[in-house]
Amino acid sequence: MKIIELRIRRLDKVEVFSGPDEIEIIPGDYVIIESPKSGSDYGIVLSILAELPAGLNQEHLSRVIRKVTPEDVAQIEENYRHDEEAFRICSEKIAEKKIKNMKLLDAEYSFSRAVVTFYYYAEERIDFRDLVRELAKVFNCRIEMRQVGRRDEARMLGGYGVCGRQLCCSLFLREFKPITIRMVKEQNLPLDPGKVSGLCGRLMCCLAYENPDKQPCSDKNSCSDKKPCCADG
């Protein structure tokens, strides 16, 4: 039985799944997976793990069903078009209801279109119960509203850092780790927020790459040309 680390759909978090040994998959492959919420979904393989991470029980892992087929790819591409329509409709509903301080970032259907997830940023808690009821009537499926932070907002929207490269968070980072002002001081960098902050307004993730306590990069293939990112660079 394979232990597979993958990212569900294009915006969700990294999770671990199990898969039969006869399925030949490598990092970068798209696969169809079991989903307790929507029956089936899809994700991209990040790595094949040598062992089960601590704290997980293999019997409780959801399964990888198969690699995507041409028919699956057509379904995913069709879902992208539905995503755009869902985003437009939700934006209009937010404006109609005059919900302030809620920035809609993206909309995303599950593979089976049993669930549509709306990602948004807000500084405070938003009461969107009426909004969800109206959206459920329009889409006739389960509605999920997912609030994200500033760093996730930057990851979703993408962009370029002061280095001129695509944002690390949208390119290869799998998780956000704490970045502290101590890292700035230890590298003798100016304590100027404009120079050490990213597009998200938080301290740049790359400050950890040359930190004395840095750890080996989790994905050397993704950052092979970023030598400071890797401990043996």
Image (cartoon, helix red, strand yellow):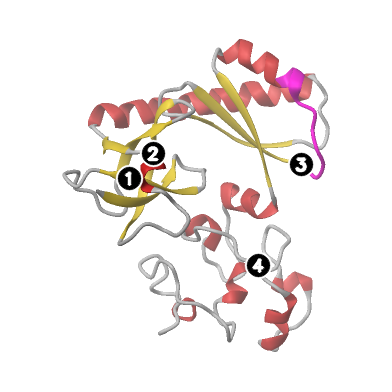
The image's mark for residue 18 is 1
Magenta residue check for 124: yes
Query: Which residue occupies 52% across, 61% down?
Result: 166
Question: Which image quarter holds the C terminus?
Answer: bottom left
Question: Real-space Cα distance between discs 2 and 3?
Answer: 31 Å
- The amino acid type of the residue labelled 1 equals Ser
Estimate the x, y position of residue 87 in percent, counting from the top left.
Answer: 60, 28
Query: Which residue occupies 46% across, 22% down?
Result: 113
Question: Circle 4 — which element?
Answer: loop
- The quadrant where residue 69 appears: top left
Q: Quick one: label 3 or label 1, which is nearer the N terminus?
A: 1
Contact, CB < 8 Å: mark 4 with mark 2?
no
Question: Real-space Cα distance between discs 3 and 1?
Answer: 35 Å
Which label sits in the foreground, 4 or 2? 2
Front residue of 209 and 91: 209
Question: Real-space Cα distance between discs 4 and 2?
Answer: 29 Å
- Provide the residue designation for mark 3: 122
Question: Circle 2 — which element?
Answer: loop
